[in-house]
Amino acid sequence: MEGLIIALGWVGVFAPVALGAVGSAIGCSVAGQAACGAMLDVESGYGKFVGLSAMPSSQVIYGIVIMFTLSAIGVTDASAPGLFGIGLLTGIALMYSAIYQGQAVAAAINASKNKPEVFGLSIAPAAIVEGFAVFAFVFALVMGQGIVA
């Protein structure tokens, strides 16, 4: 039983980066596909579409920082349940925020290819979704400090 508890603790340590990477890959793919489609319809301004499609990649960066922070605590019988809970739940939040941010970016690209003057305003929903990823990031860092090894 002790081995299972320790294993779950390690799952919690690595979950934020793994799930953040999955979400970022999906989100960047969705946004990138929209960028490719938009390039067929416009004569210029490709760079802003391609640059914007990378926006969901930030969640994997948050996951990496959380992984290093949680791994510094050390996985013991006492710390494993907290590491598992914080890491897994934060990883799920990062994954979903990256996926939905990719969809918001795709919508922004589609809107601004037809009406370029709304580009800045159209990325606001994607920025709001990013805010939720930051909330999860801060949650993990703050709650992780309360775990005693």
Image (cartoon, rainbow, N blue to C red):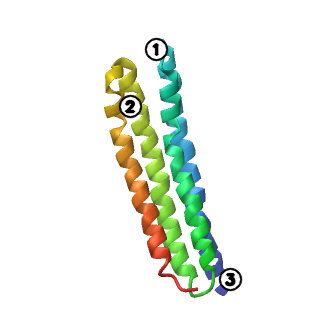
| Residue that badge 3 annotates | 3
Residue 12 in view in this figure: no
- Quadrant in which residue 118 is drawn: top left
| Residue that badge 1 annotates | 41
Task: List x then y, in percent, for residue 140.
Answer: 47, 68
Task: List x then y, in percent, for residue 145.
Answer: 49, 78
Task: List x then y, in percent, for residue 87.
Answer: 53, 68
Question: SS at mark 3?
Answer: helix
User: CB atoms at circles 2 and 1 under 8 Å apart?
Assistant: no
User: CB atoms at circles 1 and 3 under 8 Å apart?
Assistant: no
Question: SS at mark 2?
Answer: helix
Graded by Cα atoms within 10 Å as few (under 14), some (14 to 19) or many (20 or more), the crowding at tag 2 reads many
Q: CA distance from mark 2 to mark 3?
A: 47 Å
| Residue that badge 2 annotates | 108
Q: Residue shown at 54%/43% (left/top)?
A: 26
Task: Say which amino acid is labelled 1.
Answer: Asp
**Above or below for 93 versus 42:** below
Task: List x then y, in percent, for residue 76.
Answer: 63, 84
Graded by Cα atoms within 10 Å as few (under 14), some (14 to 19) or many (20 or more), the crowding at tag 1 reads few
Query: Which callout, 1 or 3, points at the residue further toward the start of the chain?
Result: 3
Residue 67 is left or right of residue 30, and the answer is right
Q: Nearer the viewer, residue 23 or 71?
A: 71
**Above or below for 123 versus 17:** above
